[in-house]
Amino acid sequence: MDHKTNLILPSLLASDWSKVGAEVQRAADAGAQWLHLDVMDGAFVDNISFGPQMVQVVRKCTEMYLDVHLMVHRADHYLERFIKAGANNITIHVEANYNTSVAETLKRIRAAGLHCGIALHPNTPFEAALPFVNDIDLLLVMTVVPGFGGQPFMEKETMPKLAAARDYRDAHGLKFNLEVDGGIYTNTAPIAKKHGANLFVCGTSSFGPPDMKQSMSDLAASVA
């Protein structure tokens, strides 16, 4: 995971689940190297998406890197199920409830041989991630309120935080990637890149257009 490499990550949340295998292949054919999977529990966020079984189904369809974002309470309780399902990276929220702790959960992800990440709600300051920055592979700055796709990009609320994370990382010689998720299109991705992002989660903007290869190409060009 090279934090100097820009990647466009299609979000499965925006795909057609009635033909999920074909949609995963469509993303791969369009040039995606990573696939983003948003897990929502209906408690931490006001929506329910899918769980470890969907991750397992996707893993059977592809060898792509699976970037699993747990928008759930008690991620430590469910962790083993996502590890066994085939996730490559598991990102957890600092704001969620845990039976143990954020730090312990990150250790368990790492011990399983996976990459791990921390996610921040738009209203959560970067300082909330500071206790964990030495132990993560990526920091996900949510650029919309987590729970639903199709929301507008929250530039004023989130870009100063993203820049602060970049500056802290670089000043301390750290290597974690900076990921953004929410309202990422060809006009907003460059703004996020300017503030330090190198991983761009794109749902509607990638899976939405009929020509996904062109949409992925356009998104990649916008942050080149």
Image: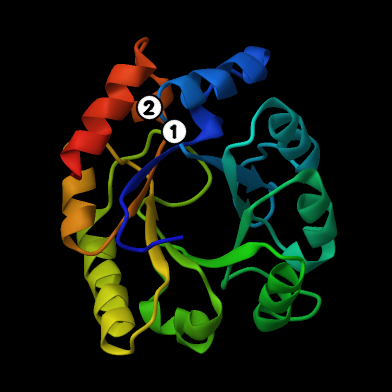
Can residue 74 be seen in the rendering of this structure? no
Q: Do the residues labelled 1 and 2 touch (CB within 8 Å)?
A: yes
Q: In the figure, residue 73 lies in which quadrant?
A: bottom right
Bin the neighbour count of mark 2 within 10 Å (Cα to Cα): few under 14, some 14-19, many 20 and up. Answer: many
Q: Position of residue 120 (x, y in %)?
A: 46, 66
Q: Quadrant of residue 31?
A: top left
Between residues 113 and 12, which one lies in front from this camera angle?
A: 113
- Label 1 and label 2: CA atoms lie apart by 10 Å
On the image, the x and y values in percent for residue 14 come to 49, 27
Q: Residues within 10 Å of mark 1 (few under 14, many from 20)?
A: many
The secondary element bearing badge 2 is classed as: helix
Tell me residue 181's x, y (percent).
40, 49
Q: Nearer the viewer, residue 45 or 28?
A: 28
In this rendering, would 28 be left or right of 221? right
Task: Find residue 143 and report its horizontal and vertical position in percent.
Answer: 35, 53
Q: Which mark is residue 206?
A: 2
Question: What type is the residue that disc 1 sits on?
Answer: Ala
Name the foreground residue: 159 vs 216.
216
**Dot 1 corresponds to which residue?**
32
**Three-letter code, disc 2:** Ser
- Name the quarter where the C terminus is drawn: top left
Specify whether residue 44 is in view: yes
Q: Residue at x 39, y 33 (%)?
A: 150
Near-viewer residue (159 or 217): 217
